[in-house]
Amino acid sequence: MKVLTILNSASIGGIEKTLLSCLKNMPQTKVDMTILCFQRGGVLEKDFKELGVNFLYIKKTGIIILDMIQLCFLLLKHKFDIVHSRFGFTSGGFVLASRLTNTKVYVSLHSTHPSTFKALKRKKILYELLSFHLKIHKYITKTLATKIIGHSKSNLDNNYPRWNSSTKYELLYNGVDFDELENDLERNDNLDIFIKDEDFVILHIGSFRKPKNHLFLIDCFNSLDPKTNNYKLILVGQGGLVNVVKEKVSQMGISDCCFFAGFDKKINKYFNKSHLFFFPSLNEGLANVLIEAQYKKLPICASDIPPIYESGYKGYHQYYFDFHDKKVAVENLNKIIEDIKKGYLKNTIIEAKKYAITNFSIQSMVQSLLKLYDERL
């Protein structure tokens, strides 16, 4: 079947990485994939093309009617069996175009709410305009989409509270390619020099954007008195706030305790060098990286937001914290560090790995996705 998947770009985000893993584990005879996106030259574009994926591009407008017109022209020119929008909250124009051209259209929800929405709350006029705009998108999607796919229960619960009562909605957990993670044997000499045998190493992986809460993360790490305690922090990722975070680290005088790894697709080496994964996000869809950490037997300390209760094993829930409350976050960090050092989490670590394998394998996701695509509606 011919599937058109709509993304912002082929960048290194969780959505793109998961889709790439799906395609690597999908029988090639099943799906002929084309990706439609706004930005050319994403870092994963070459990887997708090596799997036989074609790319098409349109302009980013943010306007429902213009999105609809652009996609209509493409759907009339290129025939597809399914359009799969990964834009969730702003898929209205794509849904309209698909229905006008008699094409099945699936919409994925990758988070509980738009990441930029809360930031505008203090700007009342913009907030009201965006609220109205999103309501139109939601109405179109709810009314006309063939399927609405939530990649966590929290995403569906927050946006469509009665989703369980309709066949329009499907829960499809994101999957992780555990085999690919294990087969990643790459090393980093600078990382090896940075880490000493006596260090306790805390890891964070995520793009340097506001939702990942890096400034809060640095405040918490600094409160652990890292120089005295031989604590090290590894930060993997790139993004618009990276220089702001580096400046904060420098001002606090803890640059020697922090390793900025930058963009890196090969993340196994960071898991192997670390003792704890710290994840104070403001907003997540499911947090695949937490699943990867648990698979690698790395304990987790994270924000107490609903999707992370799904992706994180119940034994770690006691260490979750309000992402506004530095005092509690630091207390929980100290508690989990103590429990790790004393060996109290040995059984939890084993059970967490089992939990990750049982619920979030890429093979299971591929089978479920193909089943959805094959449905006669």
Image (spheres, helix red, strand yellow):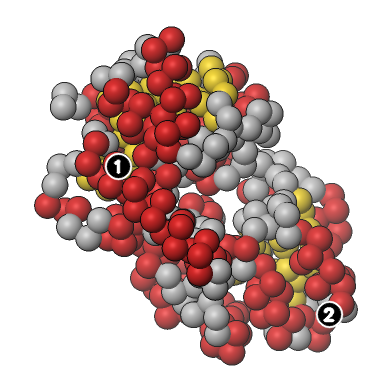
Relative to 218, residue 22 above or below: above
Q: Which mark is residue 181?
A: none
Decide if residue 2 is in sight here.
no
**First of labels 2, 1 by sequence position:** 1
Residue at position x 46%, y 56% in the image: 130
Q: Which mark is residue 252?
A: 2
Report the front residue among 148 and 77.
77
Report the front residue among 352 and 165.
165
Determine the CA span between mark 2 and mark 1.
47 Å
Decide if residue 376 is in sight here.
yes
Task: Name the secondary structure under disc 1.
Answer: helix
Quick one: quadrant of the N terminus?
top left
The amino acid type found where label 1 is placed reads Thr
Residue at position x 53%, y 77% in the image: 323
Left or right of residue 56: residue 82: left
What x and y, as percent, mark residue 8? 55, 37
Question: Badge 1 is on which residue?
Answer: 141
Relative to 349, residue 191 above or below: above
Few, some or many C-alpha atoms within 10 Å of disc 1 (few <14, some 14-19, many ≥20)?
Answer: many
Q: Image quarter for residue 172?
A: top left
Task: Name the secondary structure under disc 2.
Answer: helix
Q: Image quarter for residue 187?
A: top right
Report the front residue among 83 and 269.
83
What x and y, as percent, mark residue 84? 38, 31
Residue at position x 81%, y 60% in the image: 243
Quick one: quadrant of the C terminus?
top left
What x and y, as percent, mark residue 54? 53, 17
Callout 2–callout 1 Cβ contact below 8 Å: no
Q: Image quarter for residue 184?
A: top right
Residue at position x 48%, y 39% in the image: 63
The amino acid type found where label 2 is placed reads Met
Left or right of residue 303: residue 140: left
